Amino acid sequence: MEVLEKIDKLRIERGWSINYLAMESGLTQSTLNNLYSRKTEPKISTLRAICGAFGLTLSEFFREEGDNTDEIANKISTLSKESKEAILQLLKVLK
């Protein structure tokens, strides 16, 4: 999914107008309108502000749907040292 499409999806899911997103992100409405009208990728600083408005980190924004990496990492962190080593060995074999 393209960046602007994802921003739009998140905005629409929340029922936000472009003006409301501008207000929540601290950006001007013209900045957001320019992104949409020119169909350009936002600068990192702009995207960071937009993500902040949505309550997301950049990492969360770019994570694909169905990616449960954080969940897996959290579960692994609760395992014993021996279990972690066994998983590491398994991953090496699968590689």
Image (cartoon, grey):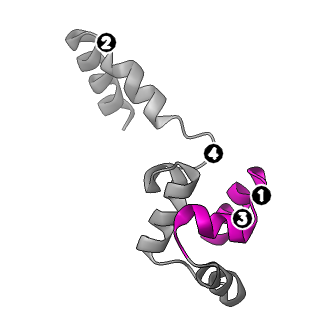
- Which residue is painted at 20% across and 13% down in the image? 81
Q: Nearer the viewer, mark 3 or mark 2?
A: 3
In space, the residues marked 4 and 2 are separated at their CA atoms by 26 Å
Q: Nearer the viewer, mark 1 or mark 4?
A: 1
Q: Which residue is mark 2?
A: 79
- The residue type indicated by label 4 comes to Glu
In the rendering, which numbered label is found on residue 12? Answer: 1
In the rendering, which numbered label is found on residue 65? Answer: 4
- Which residue is painted at 27% across and 18% down in the image? 84
Task: Give residue 47's position: percent from left, percent from top.
Answer: 50, 68
Asked whether the residues under the numbered discs 1 and 4 touch, taking CB atoms below 8 Å apart as contact, a structural biologist would say no
Asked whether the residues under the numbered discs 4 and 2 touch, taking CB atoms below 8 Å apart as contact, a structural biologist would say no
In space, the residues marked 1 and 4 are separated at their CA atoms by 17 Å
- The residue type indicated by label 3 comes to Asp
Asked whether the residues under the numbered discs 3 and 2 touch, taking CB atoms below 8 Å apart as contact, a structural biologist would say no
Other-residue count near label 2 (Cα within 10 Å), few / some / many at <14 / 14–19 / ≥20: few
In space, the residues marked 1 and 2 are separated at their CA atoms by 40 Å
Q: Earlier in the sequence, mark 1 or mark 4?
A: 1
In space, the residues marked 3 and 2 are separated at their CA atoms by 39 Å
**Residue 83 belongs to magenta span:** no
